Structure formats: structure tokens, C-alpha cells
């Protein structure tokens, strides 16, 4: 059988649900024999259809076959629309797909402001997100990912962006400024809108441990729920009124700086429970030279975001079918919260509704939330929560929490497996043997590690192995 016939058979088995190995193999064969295969067959359109990808993504996969799989599967949860276009635009950037997805969600939510909402009888839920990208320095290009979204927001909308280190009083004063509103057919009026995006590429700088930043944490905690009216009392005991509040947060930090960036007062049910942590230890993307998508796609993103900013408004409701799913989910979440100390998951239900609104606007869906969009929002949040558990668990604790995180990172860099003696020798300089043993036992009970024995020449040796992503998802 010649190469062309073999390739046709391979192509017949190719679809969205095909094994990653087959997808990679298809692109590797095409890359190595494009002159022979690509010119004889009109393959591009067929493969794009089979895999539900764009022609631009096809070109990138031809250069970098691994892009088509790995953990780059979140885009399958996103329907055609602004966010999907954003993910296609950023596919040639080294930051992992999950970073780009949450930046897009945060930016689109910031654009919508208080124009869309869900009425929860006693309060309204608006689409603001407090998103923190966390990765080792220089590995996942977290600041680059955040900057891409923030710059598109600047070009497309009038959303105020606060990107410098700021005191609580200065932030409150900046938010309290009034705006001149001019609508066609109506006289101009002055309106108070305490709205904007807090952009913190260096979260440690923005939320340092200076004494006054305790007040900043309290202010952020208060304005997260977007109250109609609230007040901030300055250090001079003057009262600053805040009206029609809507504040989003997009920040970046490293694991080692995480506890410094989030003061202890932010733990528990405070600011931490209002933040969504997106933690990635590495990225499957590796581009010595950035791969450019269609340059017109950015112009399209700006134009579409501008149109959303100008036209989108209204109340969201939940369909009867979706309400059945929502009730089952909510009761299950309530049970999980009663048996868990994971305070950062307290606001998971509200965040699901926030994401569902954002996804619906992006995809042009009706303002009647269906079961599908709620389930997709739940999956996106669950994936983020699973990856950041070890980080959020360490906030507000002693150095033991940081030790646990560092042990996880050490094992990851060693391929996921290491003996007890290796771990002890690695961290003995900063902690006692008892502290190290307790940290490892805690990680085992938290289901981050699997303990096994390997028989050596002289005696049995205890080994630790990190649970794989597949094993974690099986547990869920």
C-alpha cells in the first residue's frame, strides 16, 4: 500500500473524538510529506471540518502538531463567538490555553459591566470575575497572556483600567468619580458609576503586605458583589460614597509569591473565596518564534467587543430544564461544602452563573440559560479548581502550606516520582524531618500523592508518586 492510500485510511478514522496520538500523527505525516500529499489532495478543508478547527489553527498545527491535543482541550467547551475567536487568535502564543480562556472570560465580563445580570431576588449577580493567573516565573507567559486581553479591552471600550499600585483611599476616590451620560433624544445627565478593571500584572506589588493594604483587601471584598450603594471610610475618617459598583480583577503572580500577594486576612471566607485561581506549572506550547494568526483577527476581536459593549443588555433567566440540573447541582454543592474546609469554593454557584452569562453573550445565545451552558461553565470552573487546590489550601497557614506546595513542584520537576530519602534531603535545610514527614502525610491524605514501596538491594524504600491528571479526574 502506498503512502497516499495509508494516509486516506488514517484520515477516515479522524474526528474530534479521535485519540491524541492519531491527531498528532496526521499532522506529522502531513508536515513531513506536504509536497507529496497536500498538493495531490484538498486536505485542509476536510481536516478542518473533521476536527472542528479553523484554517489558521490548521496552519499552526502543521508547524507544531502537539498543539492539537495535550491539555489544550478547553476550547471544546466554547461555542462559536467572541471567546472562541480569542482562543484562535492566541493559539500561537506560548501561554497555556487555560490562561487565555480565563483572560477572555474576565475581559468580556468587564465589558458587560452591570448591563446584564441575574436577579436572585435579594441581590443581583453581575458578570465580574476576580481572576489570578499563577505560574512559575518565565514558564507560562502569564503576564503576556493578561496583557493581550487588557490591550484589546483598552482599544475596544471605555472601561477604566487601574493598573498601578494604588492605596485603598486612592482607589475608592477613583471609583467614586461621576460620568457625563449622553443618550440620543435625552438631555445629558451626571451619573455615578464605580466601575472598572483592576489590572495587576504583579499581584504582590498591588496587594503587598503594607499595613494599609489590609484596608484594600476589605475594600475589594466589599465591592466584589457589586452593591448598588456602599461607602469607604478613609484614614482621615472622611466617607467616600460608591454607587452602581462593578469591579473586575485580573492579576498575575508566581507560586512562591502567592502567599505574599494574598495577606492572611484574605483567607477563609474573605477575598480568597472571591478569587478564581488558575494555576499552571508548565505549558505544552513551545514556539521559539511566535506563530502569528491572521492579523485581521485582532481587528475583528476589537470590533466585536465594541459592538457587545454598545448593544448588550438585559436580564438572564434559567430555563425549566436547566433549573432541574441547577437544583441537583446546588444541593450536591451544599453537601460538599458542609463536609469540606475549602472556603474558596463557597461562591462556586455564583461563578457558574457568571460564566454562563459571559459564554451566552459570547456565543449570541438567548438570555434564557440552558442546561448545556450551565454544565460547560461548571466544567471550566472545576478544571480550574482542581489545578489550584494545593495553592488555595496554603493561604493563611504557616510555612507548612508553602512546604507542601514546594514538595509538589519538586516531584513534578523530577518526573512525578521520588523516594522518601530524596525528598527529605532536598528540603532538610529549611524544615525538620518531622515537618517534612507531616507535609508528605498531609499531601497523601489530600490525594495529591500515591505512596508505594520499591524493594532495594538492602531494604524496602518508600517512594512517592504524584497523581496524574487522569487519576484526579477519575476521582472527581
Image (cartoon, rainbow, N blue to C red):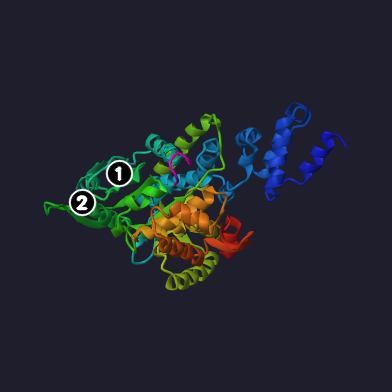
* Mark 1 and mark 2: Cα distance apart in space: 13 Å
326 or 98: which is nearer to us? 98
Mark identifier at residue 216: none
The prevailing secondary structure element of the residues shown in magenta is loop
The picture places residue 222, in percent across and down from the top left corner, at 28, 58
Q: Is residue 294 above or below residue 95?
A: above
SS type, badge 2:
loop
Q: Quadrant of residue 64?
A: top right
User: Which residue was labeled with disc 1?
Assistant: 205
Q: Quadrant of residue 23?
A: top right
- The residue depicted at 53 percent of the width and 40 percent of the height is 85
28 or 335: which is nearer to us? 28
The picture places residue 136, in percent across and down from the top left corner, at 44, 44
Q: Residues within 10 Å of mark 1 (few under 14, many from 20)?
A: some
Q: Which residues are magenta?
A: 135-140
* Residue 113 in view: yes
Amino acid at each position: 500500500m502506498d503512502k497516499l492510500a495509508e494516509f486516506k485510511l488514517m484520515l477516515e478514522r479522524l474526528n474530534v473524538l479521535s485519540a491524541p496520538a492519531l491527531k498528532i500523527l496526521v499532522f506529522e505525516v502531513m508536515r513531513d510529506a506536504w509536497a507529496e500529499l497536500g498538493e495531490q489532495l484538498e486536505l485542509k478543508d476536510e481536516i478542518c471540518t473533521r476536527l472542528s478547527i479553523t484554517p489558521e489553527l490548521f496552519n499552526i498545527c502543521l508547524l507544531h502538531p502537539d498543539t492539537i491535543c495535550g491539555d489544550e482541550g478547553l476550547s471544546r467547551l466554547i461555542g462559536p463567538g467572541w471567546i472562541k475567536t480569542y482562543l484562535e487568535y492566541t493559539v500561537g502564543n506560548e501561554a497555556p490555553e487555560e490562561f487565555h480562556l480565563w483572560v477572555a472570560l474576565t475581559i468580556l465580563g468587564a465589558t458587560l459591566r452591570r448591563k446584564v445580570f441575574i436577579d436572585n431576588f435579594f441581590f443581583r449577580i453581575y458578570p465580574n470575575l476576580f481572576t489570578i493567573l499563577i505560574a512559575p516565573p518565565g514558564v507560562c507567559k502569564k503576564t503576556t497572556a493578561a496583557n493581550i486581553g487588557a490591550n484589546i479591552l483598552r482599544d475596544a471600550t471605555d472601561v477604566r483600567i487601574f493598573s498601578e499600585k494604588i492605596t485603598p483611599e486612592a482607589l475608592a476616590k477613583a471609583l467614586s468619580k461621576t460620568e457625563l451620560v449622553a443618550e440620543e433624544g435625552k438631555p445629558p445627565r451626571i451619573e455615578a458609576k464605580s466601575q472598572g478593571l483592576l489590572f495587576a500584572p504583579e499581584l504582590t506589588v498591588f496587594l503587598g503586605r503594607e499595613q494599609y493594604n489590609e484596608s484594600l483587601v476589605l475594600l475589594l471584598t466589599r465591592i466584589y458583589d457589586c452593591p448598588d450603594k456602599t461607602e469607604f471610610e478613609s484614614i482621615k475618617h472622611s466617607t467616600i460614597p460608591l454607587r452602581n459598583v462593578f469591579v473586575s480583577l485580573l492579576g498575575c503572580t508566581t507560586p512562591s509569591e502567592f502567599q505574599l500577594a494574598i495577606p492572611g486576612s484574605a483567607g477563609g471566607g474573605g477575598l480568597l473565596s472571591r478569587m478564581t485561581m488558575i494555576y499552571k506549572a508548565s505549558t505544552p506550547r513551545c514556539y521559539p518564534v511566535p506563530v502569528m494568526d491572521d492579523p485581521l483577527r485582532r481587528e475583528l476581536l476589537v470590533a466585536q467587543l465594541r459592538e457587545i459593549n454598545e448593544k448588550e443588555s438585559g436580564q438572564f433567566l434559567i430555563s425549566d430544564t436547566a433549573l432541574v440540573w441547577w437544583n441537583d447541582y446546588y444541593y450536591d454543592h451544599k453537601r460538599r461544602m458542609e463536609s469540606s474546609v475549602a472556603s474558596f469554593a463557597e461562591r462556586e454557584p455564583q461563578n457558574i452563573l457568571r460564566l454562563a452569562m459571559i459564554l451566552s453573550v459570547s456565543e449570541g445565545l438567548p438570555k434564557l440559560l440552558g442546561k448545556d451552558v450551565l454544565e460547560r461553565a461548571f466544567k471550566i470552573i472545576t478544571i480550574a479548581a482542581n489545578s489550584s487546590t494545593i495553592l488555595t489550601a496554603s493561604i493563611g497557614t504557616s510555612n507548612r502550606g508553602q512546604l507542601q506546595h514546594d514538595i509538589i513542584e519538586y516531584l513534578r520537576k523530577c518526573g512525578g516520582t521520588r523516594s522518601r530519602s530524596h525528598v527529605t534531603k532536598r528540603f532538610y535545610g529549611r524544615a525538620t524531618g518531622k515537618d517534612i514527614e507531616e507535609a508528605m502525610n498531609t499531601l497523601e491524605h489530600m490525594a495529591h500523592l500515591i505512596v508505594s514501596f520499591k524493594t532495594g538491594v538492602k531494604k524496602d524504600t518508600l517512594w512517592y508518586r504524584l497523581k496524574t491528571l487522569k487519576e484526579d479526574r477519575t476521582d472527581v
